[in-house]
Image (tube, rainbow, N blue to C red):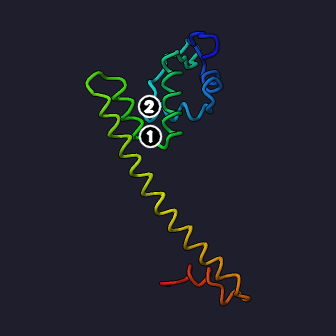
């Protein structure tokens, strides 16, 4: 982190800038229970701490790895408690890998189908005989 400076009493816009997210994202994460409701100043401004910043970075990094918000909430609960083991987190990550592998299979199948249709389309001259349009209209 920048010069190991501790972050305390940050307003929403300051936290958003430091973490590289927008203010609405922070409020959304609060609403979903991923971030604690912050203390407020006498004038009503939210005040965030180093802990909030670290938690926000955790969420951001987990999202970048493809974890859903519900999975992130589960990971945060594990990280917050001392009753789980690293193997519990590994199981969640292994399940995510399996899910991603299934998505890759589905996307590969879609790509093959579209590639085939595009090649067939190269020989068609009218929209009436367009294989892509015909494929999308099947079953109607």
Tell me if residue 129 comes above or below residue 103 in the rendering: below
Q: Are discs 2 and 1 less than 8 Å apart at CB?
A: yes
Residue 121 image position (x, y, % from top left): 67, 82
Callout 2 crowding tier (Cα within 10 Å): few <14, some 14–19, many ≥20: many
**Residue at x 53%, y 39% (from the top left corner):** 64
Residue identifier under label 2: 34
Instruction: Give left or right: position of 2 versus 81.
Output: right
- Dot 2 or dot 1: first in sequence order is 2
Quadrant location of the N terminus in the rendered image: top right
- Where is residue 85 shown, x and y percent of the image? 28, 28
Dot 1 crowding, Cα within 10 Å, few <14, some 14–19, many 20+:
some
**Residue drawn at (63%, 30%), measured in percent from left and top?**
20
Q: Is residue 69 left or right of residue 53?
A: left
Q: Nearer the viewer, residue 107 or 48?
A: 107
How many labels sit on residues? 2
- Cα separation, mark 2 vs mark 1, equals 8 Å
Picture residue at 61% right of the left edge, 78% below the top: 117
**Is 1 located above or below residue 67 in the figure?**
above
- x, y percent for residue 19: 60, 26
Residue 101: quadrant of the picture: bottom left
Residue drawn at 65 percent across, 79 percent down: 119
Q: Is residue 73 left or right of residue 48?
A: left
Question: What is the x, y in percent for residue 11?
Answer: 60, 19
Which residue is labeled 1 in the image? Answer: 69
Describe the element under mark 1 as helix, strand or loop.
helix
Describe the element under mark 2 as helix, strand or loop: loop
* Residue 95's disc number: none
- Image: 137 above or below 48: below
In this view, the residue farthest toward the right is: 125
């Amino acid at each position: 982190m920048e010069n190991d400076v501790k972050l305390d009493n940050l307003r929403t816009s300051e936290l958003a800038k430091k973490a590289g997210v927008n203010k609405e994202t922070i409020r959304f994460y609060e609403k979903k229970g991923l971030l604690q409701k912050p203390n407020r100043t006498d004038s009503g401004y939210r005040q965030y701490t180093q802990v909030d910043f670290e938690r926000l970075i955790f969420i951001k990094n987990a999202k970048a790895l493809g974890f859903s918000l519900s999975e992130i909430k589960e990971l945060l609960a594990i990280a917050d408690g001392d009753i789980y083991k690293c193997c519990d987190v590994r199981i969640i990550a292994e399940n995510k890998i399996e899910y991603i592998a299934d998505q890759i299979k589905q996307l590969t199948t879609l790509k093959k189908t579209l590639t085939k249709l595009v090649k067939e389309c190269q020989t068609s001259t009218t929209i009436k005989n367009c294989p892509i349009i015909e494929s999308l209209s099947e079953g109607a």
